[in-house]
Image (cartoon, rainbow, N blue to C red):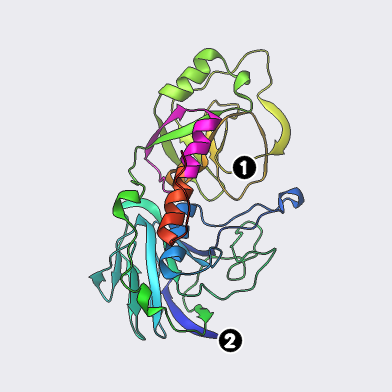
């Protein structure tokens, strides 16, 4: 199937990249998964449009892009509320809309969260690198030449008409995660929680931390009380692999939540944010406050099963609700 021009980038926004669900299976070669940070919102966009789960969309951070439609195209905007507008009028999020040639979509600024997602019918047409179209900024590959959008870029999609019976489809509002600035993040302790004193872990799991200005797609550094380490253990360990959500504590005792563009680290990890709460992490911005709540692995698995049940139910699949 041939591709056609769908959007011209009039303004790129602060950081707008092409992402999909990420590239898996390449960590052993030092390649992180990249992909959408808020996978929940990203996946909903594709479900709304009837796309395959892995189709590529746009991730806009803080200030979104201004795009001009070059043809008829169906879209859905999900994620943090960056106040999307269509031809100057507010655009309802979590719903499928039909754009015609000449329409302009833009974003006015943050109302809640900090990352919005734009899905299009058929997904954006770009080469797959290591089985993914996701942009890996540090590696400078994937997406559009491994970089954010620029003014004048033209985005292409497969040459097929929108599925008209999808127009107006909405995601249930009571299923949408609240992107408030003070979330409680559920965590599973470990793998090196025993490197910290009892008081240190209590501080970590009961006190409030604030998101610093040092936050990007690699990780989020937090400010707050110092997490006390045991005096008989080293602050560093032999570098090892980790997954998004791992919480490292370097020598200064200030935690760092790891995101999707790092694969190894040499600081002890006191806990890991559960998969279901990673979208909340993705929507954090400087100044937001967070608290951590320890739960068991079994509880984390149950919450993930519940989320997947909801998504599959919305997709229309036949699936039994987890007990």
Pointer 1 or 2: first along the chain: 2
Residue that appears at 63% across and 53% down? 33
Q: Quadrant of residue 290?
A: top left
Q: Residues within 10 Å of mark 1 (few under 14, many from 20)?
A: some
Q: Quadrant of residue 315?
A: bottom left
Which numbered circle lies on residue 282? Answer: none
Q: Is residue 276 above or below residue 298?
A: below
Front residue of this view, candidates 150 and 178 = 178
**Count of picture labels:** 2
In the displayed structure, would residue 214 be above or below residue 171? Answer: above
Relative to 183, is 303 on the left or the right? right
Q: Secondary structure at mark 1?
A: loop
Instruction: Using the image as rendered, state which of residue 128 and residue 289 is in the foreground.
Output: 128
**Mark 2 neighbour class, 10 Å CA radius: few under 14, some 14 to 19, many 20 or more:** few
Question: What secondary structure is marked by label 2?
Answer: loop
- The residue that disc 1 covers is 243
Question: Mark 1 and mark 2: span between their CA atoms?
Answer: 37 Å
Where on the picture, by quarter, is residue 228? top right
The N terminus sits in image quarter: bottom right
Residue 278 screen position, x and y as percent: 48, 44
Residue 49 point in image, percent of width and height: 43, 70
State left or right for residue 172 relative to residue 70: left
Residue at 41% across, 48% down = 283
At x 62%, y 19%, the residue is 194
Residue at point 41%, 80% (across, down): 73
Give the number of the mark in front: 1 or 2: 2
Q: Which residue is mark 2?
A: 2
Percent coordinates x, y for residue 148 in the rendering: 53, 65
Tell me which segment is drawn in magenta: 283-305
Inspect this view and state whether residue 111 appears. no
Give the left or right position of residue 80, taking residue 247 as reference.
left
């Amino acid at each position: 199937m041939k591709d056609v021009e769908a959007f011209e980038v009039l303004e790129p926004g602060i950081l707008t990249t092409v992402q999909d669900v990420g590239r898996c299976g390449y960590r052993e070669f030092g390649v992180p998964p990249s992909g959408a940070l808020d996978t929940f919102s990203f996946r909903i966009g594709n479900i709304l449009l009837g796309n395959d789960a892995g189709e590529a969309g746009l991730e806009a951070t803080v200030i979104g892009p201004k795009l001009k439609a070059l043809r008829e195209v169906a879209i859905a905007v999900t994620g943090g509320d960056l106040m999307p507008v269509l031809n100057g009028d507010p655009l309802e999020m979590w719903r499928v809309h039909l754009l015609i040639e000449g329409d302009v979509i833009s974003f006015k600024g943050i109302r809640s969260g900090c990352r919005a997602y734009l899905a299009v019918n058929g997904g954006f047409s770009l080469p797959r690198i290591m089985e993914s179209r996701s942009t890996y900024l540090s590696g400078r590959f994937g997406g559009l030449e491994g970089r954010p959008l620029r003014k004048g870029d033209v985005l292409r999609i497969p040459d097929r008409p929108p599925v008209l019976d999808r127009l107006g489809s909405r995601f249930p509002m009571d299923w949408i995660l609240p992107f408030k600035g003070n979330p409680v993040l559920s965590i599973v302790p470990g793998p090196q929680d025993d490197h910290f004193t009892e008081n240190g872990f209590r501080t970590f799991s009961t006190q409030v931390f604030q998101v610093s200005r040092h936050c990007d797609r690699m990780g989020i550094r937090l400010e707050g009380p110092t997490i006390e380490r045991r005096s008989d253990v080293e602050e560093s360990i032999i570098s090892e692999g980790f997954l998004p959500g791992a919480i490292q504590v370097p020598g200064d005792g200030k935690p760092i939540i790891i995101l999707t563009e790092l694969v190894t680290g040499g600081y002890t990890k006191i806990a890991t944010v559960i998969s279901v709460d990673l979208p909340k992490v993705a929507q954090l911005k400087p100044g937001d406050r967070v608290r951590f709540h320890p739960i068991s692995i079994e509880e984390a698995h149950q919450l993930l099963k519940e989320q997947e049940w909801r998504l599959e139910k919305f997709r229309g699949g036949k699936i039994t609700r987890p007990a």
